[in-house]
Amino acid sequence: MTAAASHIPAPAEKPPVASVGFIGWMRENLFSSWSNALLTVLIVWLLFKTIPPLVGWLFINAYGFDTSSRVCIADRSGACWAFVGEKFRFILYGTFPYDEHWRPLTTVLIFVGLLAASCSRRFWRPWFAGVWIVGLLAVGVLMWGGVFGLSRVENALWGGLPLTIMLSVVGLAVAFPLSVLLALGRRSNMPAIKAICVGYIELIRGVPLVSLLFMSSVMFPLFLPEGFTVDKLLRAQVAFILFAAAYQAEAIRGGLQAIPKGQYEAADALGLSYWQKMGKIILPQALTISIPPLVNTFIAFFKDTSLVIIIGLFDLLGTAKAALTDPNWRGFFLEAYLFIGLIYWFFCYSMSKYSQWLERSLHRGHAR
Amino acid sequence: MQTAARRLPEGNEIIRCIGVNKWYGEFHVLRNIDLNVARGERIVICGPSGSGKSTLIRCINRLEEHQKGHIVVDGIELTGNLKNIELVRRDVGMVFQHFNLFPHLTVLENCTLAPIWVRRQPKAEAEATAMKFLERVQIANQAKKYPGQLSGGQQQRVAIARSLCMNPKIMLFDEPTSALDPEMVKEVLDVMIGLADSGMTMLVVTHEMGFAKSVADRVIFMDRGEIVEQNTPQEFFTNPQSERTRLFLSQILSH
Amino acid sequence: MAQTRLSLNDPVTRGLFYQALVIGGVVAVGWYLIHNTLTNLESRSIATGYSFLEREASFAIGETLIDYSPADSYGRALLVGLLNTLKVSAIGIALATVLGVVVGIARLSKNFLVARLASAYVEVVRNIPPLLQLFFWYALITEGMPAVRQALEPLPGVFLTQRGLWMPVPLADPAWKAMGVAFIAACFALWGVKRWAAARQARTGQPFPLFAAGAGLLAGVPFVVWLAYGAPTAMSVPELRGFNFVGGVNLSPEFFAILVGLTVYTSAFIAEVVRSGILAVNWGQTEASRALGLNNAQALRLVVLPQALRVIIPPVTSQYLNLTKNTSLALAIGYPDLVSIANTVINQTGQAIEGVAIIMGVYLSISLAISLFMNWYNKKIALVER
Amino acid sequence: MKKTILAATAAAAATFAISTAQAGPTFDAVKAKGFVQCGVNAGLAGFSNPDSAGAWSGLDVDFCRAVAAAVFGDATKVKYTPLSAQQRFPAIQSGEVDILSRNTTWSLTRDTALGLNFAPTTYYDGQGFMAPKKLGVKSAKELNGATVCVQSGTTTELNLADYFRANNMTFKPVVIEALDEVSAAYFAGRCDVYTSDASQLAGIRAAVASNPTDHVLLPEIISKEPLAPAVRHGDDQWFDVVKWAVYATITAEENGITSKNIDEHLQSKNPEIQRFLGVTPGMGKALGLDEKWAYNIVKQVGNYGEIFDRNVGPTTALKLDRGLNALWTKGGLQYAPPVR
């Protein structure tokens, strides 16, 4: 046996140059095999072909915000941001009286503020519902006016971004309690209640939103007693609430299903009644788990508000399309769609990132 | 070369590692590994976590790629050549810490999949072989079940049988018992001991020192990517040469 | 707690009481609405019933899969709409699946550029309302393409204009029908070959090159039939006559926009499903297959895909359903799908309730059929799992 | 089937229903709320169009104002509900609006199956075609094989199909629901021709075309399109008010009464004018209105000729001639029954 008296650790060596650093990264990520290398070259070539013209159109050849439409129409080699410059207030606020645009703007800010604050777990407390109610009241006052010296604005004049956000946020908020009941009902062991809830949820989820909007637009008036009418916006809002309730109920049901049986048994063992058990033990946990899917529902919902254009309401997409019909500014659809696309994208993307982050952080919480 | 407890024919090495180096990014995970394994030899590799022992055996069937040095298995050098890699893998069985049985196939199908598709055996023949090995790991009565229906120990035994169905020349074990509940460790170790007795070449990464003492021809201690010490189990446990080995053994054996 | 007789503390009684309460409430609300509706319909003398379905529609439809003229009935007009919906859905589902799988796999690519491009695609596409995307594609054609007289001709006989794409199609010939039959026959033959190959492999262990044989069979048999019919090559080539191109086949901008819009939108969601399905299969499964000597393709086909598909198929089905429901957006760009035809019918007849009921009924049947299939499928794979 | 449900529910309804069946529910409701809710087109130059401040103007709008002037003595007591083609009938049927004054063609089915009553025609229109000048088309008879843009759910959609069938021609329809979208599609070149009511084509050409002179209206008028305000069944008194508000504007023109000279006519010795302007009472009472009802209409809104000229006449962007809409005395169709 030739055992060494004491082992001297070998020094750590630098890896071969080709496997680390920029070259290593390139080898690993771009040229790891022949097919990969070919793909990389192809994509670089494609990017080279598309990016410069795109940048040229977007910025270099583009006309700034204060160009006249005549100049833009004469030369279409670049984007005409003058269109956006001319129309952005109309696109954002619709036909709301021009001098009062600070009101829809404040409304949007309130909504964004409320949504942003709701993202923080610090505010997941019952009292925060009060903040929401105050916020929504403020929004109502701002938009309708008629008090505090604000001029009254008919809701037929509302449009653009505030309308988009309002339809989705109010729809979500009002549908929420309903969806909790539906989710509980669907898991109820009372057959009649379960059947009603399942029937409702599957009915709504089985038909396109357009048909619900149709219903609100052309049929809803017939459901009400003679002489009792509800205006178009509110009817669309009702359709959205009914729609949202079914989808949210499914998200919440997922949360309820994820609660281990032991929690129910523990609550029963404590002698709690059904509503005490649900309200104090199950729902707080289930809703927390449900938040990421609820946020995803909200994103889908936010995008779906664009469908109100079909029943003649002017949400963000509606105002953009209306702006495009101006004969002086015809044909700038790319600019218009890019502009509102960016707004939609900003909202949806940040919410989806939030939802993903939340899911991870909740998951961590559970794992611990 | 240390003197082995059992006499082994000289120059009959089935695995040869010469100056093997591997990096994960900047991290030097295997440092100048020289290791020869003789046919029929049983080697236990131990060492603290992160010492590179799993990486070493995973290099032997090219689940990991080494960047420097040579690995020759049964006369075939492992390089980028896919053909060679496949040839080597057919002859090298591997058992994983987390079993990695295929959940969508029955126990029997798990065992016959590779013989049918890789060795191109007729189904009946593959099933007969599989039943033989399942018999040997004493789980033949579960052949129609799905992995999810078995306990961890049973799953690991199926995994061993699955590897054996390919009739390998070498078996690699990557911490085969560390994901098991204590009461199941023994059933798996018993199977492994039986396998060792049959003369299989085995490389086992494990912390089961009892197994090492009773079965291994040689114990290898790795730390920080290098082989610190190798010796017969007898010498290794009673008279460790290096300070680090001693420290490691005191931690392992104290509980 | 004191037990009183027949009190609400008895769970059974209480359950019945609550259920009676809820049913009563639902029935009351439903009855109230129906009552209002009926009174309203009567007091305003609005026509009811489905007899209008047999009346002459008198309006024209731009794209039809079956023969239709304004002299046909409203019922047939609605059928035309339904078939158009199914056409867009079927083609859209096929294309979205292909695109979604490619993008989903691309997101997992080791190639940095490929993975980044794919994830940018997904993040852009799924965060913009589908309706906006439809308008975008529609405008891109109607505003971005040249007028009919200045049509682009990228390939001989293929014309690209703001009124859509014209392509040559083979002239009607009995050969085409025979080839279709031959293709179906080849499918059956392939199924037989597959069974035979499996049996042979079980017996001898020899695998059969099924992929090559299948491709040869599916392409070869119709080709032979085509030759047997004298290899007809006469084409109907579109040419500008009068206002429009005549001959060939036309893909209208409306069809193109709804198809591309929905395909792109849905593919982003399918890509995410595919990606998470593949990620859901433990890497250890691949390693174990490799360690057993399976090659890449075998590991994918025999081990990874069967497991990934179980995770993938249920959510992908619901994406298919979403795509089908989203075809209703066709209304906004004038593609004559079911909803848009029903909308016209409602406008012409004033019978909104019946019209909306037809839309909902059709979509509910589609959803129900798909969920029944899904339940069956889930049960089937659940059986295999345990 | 439906009838049995109806009977069953009606029987049960007796206990539950709120009785609403008095005479004149709409008229009463309008008076009670203090304004007329008027359904108009969401934007059609000359007929109903909001300006940037949201104030509505147009021929259809003016007849709503005339009704308000008759009922309240104040033409501004109107609220407008912009409606799409699809929404217009449910809106009037459900009572969401009190009058539908939205370039709506009076037809038999609409009169019956939709449960509407049409007031006198306020604009005699007909369906025409508009085509780009550079297409070189001189007559609708040359349109065989053309692609035609048309708004869905309108009588134009039906007439179009009838016309091509009758003339043994084929066409490819591009049917879109929103007016904006249809005209956008036409001006983008998606279609060869655009068909709609001739007045509407003129309005669109004036308001939407980037260069109105690039487009021509073809000579053929392929249908009768009497555009009239409508009310729902069930309130004859309200129907009378709307009907006579329209007739009042025509009567005023027949008698040469304009918003400018109306105060002079208060001194008129003509007994019909005296009855009309409420100098001799009785007519207003018969309608359930103030005796000054017609005076208020003409004073605040004008006579028919004034309304026409102001909104769609030759001096406006639409440049429409009176044509069929001239008084009967001048070879047109506008004719009011006697006020007596």
Image (tube, rainbow, N blue to C red):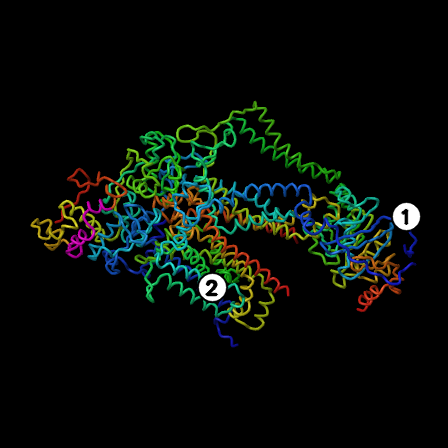
Pick the quarter of the image with the N terminus of chain A: bottom right
- The numbered mark at residue C245 is none
Q: Was residue B133 drawn as part of the magenta stretch in this picture?
A: no
Q: Was residue D308 drawn as part of the magenta stretch in this picture?
A: yes
Does residue C291 appear left or right of residue C124 in this picture?
Answer: right
Residue interval drawn in magenta: D284-310
* Above or below, comparing residue D131 to residue A333 in the picture: above
Which amino acid, by three-letter code, is at mark 1? Gly
Disc 2 is placed on an element classified as helix
* Above or below, comparing residue C153 to residue B165 in the picture: above
Residue C274 locus on image (x, y percent): 60, 49
Pick the quarter of the image with the C terminus of chain A: bottom right
Q: Could one spot residue B128 in this view of the protein? A: no
Residue wearing tag 1? B11
Q: Nearer the viewer, residue B40 or D303?
A: D303
- The numbered mark at residue A114 is 2
